[in-house]
Image: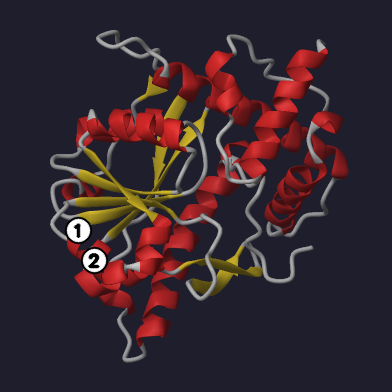
């Protein structure tokens, strides 16, 4: 293996750990889907292995460290491949169909089809290929979509926003939601669908504690708070990677906030968040190598 590829892999994960997309891949035409686990920076690898151990332990079985290492290697390979796919899509020439990865269209339950014909919130986690997910939902939803995003370096952010417009996507930056919630709520209230990743690292004073694979964990409270305020249902879903390299979508049961309404608004937010997380857990358990938990520290007391 060439040192250039190893260096690139390290750079990718370091930048992801810092919340900065790997701009290096803009100019890179080669990415090796498998490389020594020792090449991964310590902190992202530690977080990933902690998540894998927690998922495995929640099933009640003894945790095999060889299995943890195997799953960590496969997860890293899937992640790096998806990053390369995303940048290839973003770098497609104007007027040329982007090189979409293979996508196996799932059977869509009647309940989900009904959801997609009304206003709602689509909840997922860091997995698969986010642009492939956007392309899939563009085909099955009607109307505009607002998407929670983290701010990116200016050049990349400008390109992402431009690309999002082709999907009818309105970007909503997480820090704006926290700094100016009333203004941002007005901006997105009329948009039929709001897409959010529930496993974004929670910001100070905006987290709610729930059970996640048998351990107390912190998640952003904004999605559930919006659902409670607007009485919009939440569809738990994830785009995951199959064994042959293709992607597909997996759905959880729809969470209806009114079923978790309580006099104490914060408790209602907690109960709604817990319901969504409980629906996402089986998908993560089924596809653990599609759960890209390199830099998130969800669990309370996680070292």
Q: Which one is nearer the viewer's eye here, 199 or 172?
A: 172
Residues packed near mark 2 inside 10 Å, few (<14), some (14 to 19) or many (20 plus): few
Tell me whether circle 1 and circle 2 mark residues in contact (CB < 8 Å): yes
98 on left or right of 298: left
Colour theme: secondary structure
Label 1 sits on residue: 187
Q: Is residue 34 above or below residue 225?
A: above
Res. 269 visible in picture: yes
Q: Is residue 270 above or below residue 13?
A: below
Label number found at residue 130:
none
Q: Is residue 82 above or below residue 303?
A: above
Q: Quadrant of residue 38?
A: top right
Residue at the image position 48 percent from the left and 61 percent from the top: 277
> x and y percent of residue 207 in the render?
51, 71
Mark pair 1, 2: CA separation: 6 Å
Label number found at residue 183:
2
């Amino acid at each position: 293996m060439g040192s250039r590829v190893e260096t690139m892999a390290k750079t990718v994960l370091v930048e992801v750990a810092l919340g900065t997309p790997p701009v290096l891949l803009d100019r890179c035409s080669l990415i090796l889907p498998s490389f020594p686990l020792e090449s991964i920076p310590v902190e992202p690898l530690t977080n990933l292995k902690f998540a894998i151990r927690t998922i495995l332990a929640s099933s009640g079985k003894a945790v095999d460290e060889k299995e943890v290492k195997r799953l960590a290697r496969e997860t890293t390979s899937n992640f790096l491949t998806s990053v390369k796919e995303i940048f290839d899509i973003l770098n497609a020439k104007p007027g040329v169909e982007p090189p979409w990865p293979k996508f196996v269209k799932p059977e869509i339950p009647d309940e989900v089809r009904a959801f997609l014909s009304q206003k709602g919130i689509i909840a997922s986690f860091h997995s698969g290929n986010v642009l492939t997910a956007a392309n899939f939902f563009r085909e099955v939803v009607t109307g505009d979509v607002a998407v929670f995003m983290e701010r990116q370096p200016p050049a990349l952010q400008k390109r992402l926003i431009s690309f999002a417009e082709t999907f009818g996507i309105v970007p909503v930056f997480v820090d704006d939601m926290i700094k100016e919630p009333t203004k941002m709520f007005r901006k997105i209230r009329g948009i039929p669908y709001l897409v959010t990743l529930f496993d974004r690292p929670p910001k100070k004073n905006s987290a709610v504690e729930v059970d996640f694979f048998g351990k107390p964990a912190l998640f952003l409270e904004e999605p559930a708070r919006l659902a409670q305020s607007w009485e919009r249902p939440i569809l738990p879903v994830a785009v995951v990677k199959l064994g042959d390299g293709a992607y597909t979508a997996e759905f959880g049961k729809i969470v209806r906030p009114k079923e978790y309404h309580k006099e104490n608004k914060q408790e209602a937010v907690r109960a709604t968040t817990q319901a969504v997380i409980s629906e996402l857990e089986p998908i993560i358990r089924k596809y653990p190598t599609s759960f890209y938990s390199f830099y998130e520290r969800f669990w309370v007391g996680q070292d």
